[in-house]
Amino acid sequence: MRSIRQFIVLLTMMFWQGGFMFYGGVVVPVGGRILGSETQQGFITQSVTNYLNLAGAVCLIVWAEQLWHERRHGVTKLEWSIWCCNIAALGVLVVDHWCMGRVLESSSASVIDPERFGLYHKLYIGTSSLQWLASLLMLFLAIRRWNRSIAI
Protein backbone atom coordinates (compact mmCIF):
# COMPACT_ATOMS: atom_id res chain seq x y z
CA MET A 1 0.00 0.00 0.00
CA ARG A 2 2.90 2.35 0.76
CA SER A 3 4.24 2.07 -2.79
CA ILE A 4 0.81 2.85 -4.21
CA ARG A 5 0.55 5.99 -2.04
CA GLN A 6 4.02 7.09 -3.12
CA PHE A 7 3.14 6.48 -6.77
CA ILE A 8 -0.06 8.54 -6.47
CA VAL A 9 1.87 11.35 -4.76
CA LEU A 10 4.35 11.40 -7.63
CA LEU A 11 1.58 11.34 -10.25
CA THR A 12 -0.30 14.24 -8.70
CA MET A 13 2.91 16.26 -8.26
CA MET A 14 3.96 15.63 -11.87
CA PHE A 15 0.55 16.67 -13.16
CA TRP A 16 0.43 19.83 -11.02
CA GLN A 17 3.99 21.10 -11.19
CA GLY A 18 4.73 19.65 -14.62
CA GLY A 19 1.63 21.37 -15.93
CA PHE A 20 2.71 24.62 -14.31
CA MET A 21 6.19 24.43 -15.83
CA PHE A 22 4.96 23.46 -19.29
CA TYR A 23 2.23 26.08 -19.33
CA GLY A 24 4.48 28.87 -18.11
CA GLY A 25 7.46 27.88 -20.21
CA VAL A 26 5.78 26.88 -23.47
CA VAL A 27 2.06 27.67 -23.73
CA VAL A 28 2.16 31.28 -22.49
CA PRO A 29 4.94 32.45 -24.86
CA VAL A 30 3.56 30.51 -27.84
CA GLY A 31 0.00 31.67 -27.14
CA GLY A 32 1.10 35.29 -26.85
CA ARG A 33 2.98 35.03 -30.15
CA ILE A 34 0.11 33.34 -32.02
CA LEU A 35 -2.61 35.57 -30.57
CA GLY A 36 -0.40 38.64 -31.05
CA SER A 37 -1.01 39.91 -27.54
CA GLU A 38 -0.01 39.02 -24.00
CA THR A 39 -3.38 40.39 -22.91
CA GLN A 40 -5.26 37.96 -25.17
CA GLN A 41 -3.12 35.10 -23.87
CA GLY A 42 -3.85 36.31 -20.34
CA PHE A 43 -7.56 35.65 -20.77
CA ILE A 44 -6.75 32.02 -21.61
CA THR A 45 -4.39 31.86 -18.63
CA GLN A 46 -7.14 33.25 -16.40
CA SER A 47 -9.21 30.14 -17.08
CA VAL A 48 -6.33 27.65 -17.10
CA THR A 49 -4.99 28.73 -13.71
CA ASN A 50 -8.25 27.61 -12.11
CA TYR A 51 -7.36 24.08 -13.21
CA LEU A 52 -3.75 24.44 -12.05
CA ASN A 53 -4.95 25.57 -8.62
CA LEU A 54 -7.40 22.67 -8.47
CA ALA A 55 -4.59 20.27 -9.39
CA GLY A 56 -2.53 21.82 -6.60
CA ALA A 57 -5.32 21.32 -4.08
CA VAL A 58 -5.70 17.66 -5.09
CA CYS A 59 -1.94 17.11 -4.91
CA LEU A 60 -1.63 18.73 -1.50
CA ILE A 61 -4.53 16.68 -0.11
CA VAL A 62 -2.90 13.49 -1.42
CA TRP A 63 0.43 14.66 -0.03
CA ALA A 64 -1.05 15.29 3.44
CA GLU A 65 -2.51 11.79 3.44
CA GLN A 66 0.88 10.37 2.49
CA LEU A 67 2.67 12.37 5.20
CA TRP A 68 0.15 11.17 7.77
CA HIS A 69 0.63 7.52 6.83
CA GLU A 70 4.42 7.91 6.70
CA ARG A 71 4.73 9.64 10.09
CA ARG A 72 6.43 6.55 11.55
CA HIS A 73 8.95 6.49 8.69
CA GLY A 74 10.80 9.69 9.55
CA VAL A 75 8.52 12.47 8.30
CA THR A 76 10.06 15.65 9.66
CA LYS A 77 8.61 18.90 10.93
CA LEU A 78 10.34 20.51 7.96
CA GLU A 79 8.25 18.43 5.56
CA TRP A 80 5.04 19.41 7.34
CA SER A 81 6.19 23.06 7.38
CA ILE A 82 6.85 23.06 3.65
CA TRP A 83 3.48 21.41 3.05
CA CYS A 84 1.86 24.19 5.14
CA CYS A 85 3.73 26.82 3.10
CA ASN A 86 2.35 25.23 -0.08
CA ILE A 87 -1.17 25.32 1.34
CA ALA A 88 -0.74 28.98 2.33
CA ALA A 89 0.66 29.81 -1.11
CA LEU A 90 -2.30 28.09 -2.76
CA GLY A 91 -4.65 30.20 -0.64
CA VAL A 92 -2.82 33.38 -1.70
CA LEU A 93 -3.00 32.30 -5.35
CA VAL A 94 -6.74 31.62 -5.20
CA VAL A 95 -7.50 34.98 -3.58
CA ASP A 96 -5.11 36.83 -5.88
CA HIS A 97 -6.63 35.14 -8.93
CA TRP A 98 -10.06 36.31 -7.81
CA CYS A 99 -8.70 39.86 -7.35
CA MET A 100 -7.15 39.85 -10.83
CA GLY A 101 -10.44 38.67 -12.30
CA ARG A 102 -12.18 41.69 -10.80
CA VAL A 103 -10.03 44.09 -12.84
CA LEU A 104 -10.54 42.26 -16.13
CA GLU A 105 -13.38 42.77 -18.59
CA SER A 106 -13.95 39.47 -20.38
CA SER A 107 -16.47 40.72 -22.94
CA SER A 108 -14.00 43.25 -24.37
CA ALA A 109 -10.88 41.27 -23.40
CA SER A 110 -9.45 44.33 -21.68
CA VAL A 111 -7.83 45.24 -18.39
CA ILE A 112 -9.94 47.75 -16.45
CA ASP A 113 -7.16 48.82 -14.06
CA PRO A 114 -3.74 47.98 -15.54
CA GLU A 115 -1.77 49.26 -12.53
CA ARG A 116 -3.70 47.19 -10.01
CA PHE A 117 -3.64 44.18 -12.33
CA GLY A 118 0.15 44.53 -12.61
CA LEU A 119 0.51 44.41 -8.83
CA TYR A 120 -1.75 41.37 -8.55
CA HIS A 121 0.06 39.66 -11.40
CA LYS A 122 3.50 40.23 -9.81
CA LEU A 123 2.17 38.73 -6.56
CA TYR A 124 0.79 35.77 -8.50
CA ILE A 125 4.05 35.12 -10.36
CA GLY A 126 6.14 35.52 -7.20
CA THR A 127 3.91 33.27 -5.13
CA SER A 128 3.75 30.65 -7.89
CA SER A 129 7.54 30.66 -8.15
CA LEU A 130 7.99 30.24 -4.40
CA GLN A 131 5.38 27.48 -4.39
CA TRP A 132 7.23 25.73 -7.21
CA LEU A 133 10.49 25.86 -5.23
CA ALA A 134 8.74 24.63 -2.08
CA SER A 135 7.18 21.78 -4.05
CA LEU A 136 10.58 20.74 -5.40
CA LEU A 137 12.02 20.78 -1.88
CA MET A 138 9.04 18.80 -0.56
CA LEU A 139 9.56 16.22 -3.31
CA PHE A 140 13.31 16.03 -2.68
CA LEU A 141 12.78 15.45 1.06
CA ALA A 142 10.17 12.76 0.40
CA ILE A 143 12.37 10.88 -2.07
CA ARG A 144 15.31 11.08 0.34
CA ARG A 145 13.12 9.71 3.16
CA TRP A 146 11.76 6.95 0.91
CA ASN A 147 15.30 5.94 -0.05
CA ARG A 148 16.40 5.86 3.61
CA SER A 149 13.53 3.60 4.54
CA ILE A 150 14.41 1.20 1.68
CA ALA A 151 18.02 1.01 2.86
CA ILE A 152 17.00 -0.03 6.38
Image (cartoon, helix red, strand yellow):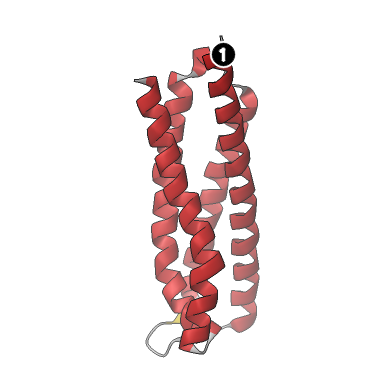
Residue 83 rendering spot, x and y as whole percentages:
55, 36
Q: Residue at x 57, y 49 (%)?
A: 89
Report how many numbered discs are placed on residues in the image.
Answer: 1
Name, please, the residue furthest toward the front. 151
Q: Where does the image place residue 143, in percent across and percent down from the top left?
A: 56, 29
Check the picture and name the quadrant holding the N terminus. Answer: top left
Q: Residue at x 59, y 17 (%)?
A: 148
Relative height, residue 66 to residue 26 (above, below): above
Residue 113 visible, this orientation: yes
Question: Quarter-wise, where is residue 134 in the image?
Answer: top right
Q: Residue at image x 50%, y 51%?
A: 17
Please indicate, yes or no, whether residue 111 appears anywhere in the rendered image: no
Q: Residues within 10 Å of mark 1 (few under 14, many from 20)?
A: few
Image vertical order of residue 109 relative to residue 80, above or below = below
Q: Position of residue 80 (x, y in %)?
A: 57, 29
From the image, which quarter does the C terminus lie in?
top right
Q: Secondary structure at mark 1?
A: helix
Instruction: Depth check: give the residue in front, 86 or 21.
Output: 21
Q: Quadrant of residue 25?
A: bottom right
| Residue under numbered circle 1 | 151
For this rendering, which residue is in front, 77 or 151? Answer: 151
Q: Position of residue 20 (x, y in %)?
A: 50, 58
Front-lying residue, 123 or 128: 128
Residue at position x 47%, y 86% from top? 34
Q: Quadrant of residue 51?
A: bottom left
Outermost top residue: 152
**From what the image shows, is residue 111 above or below residue 131?**
below
**Relative side of 44 to 113, left or right:** left
Q: Is residue 143 left or right of residue 59?
A: right
Q: Amino acid at mark 1?
A: Ala
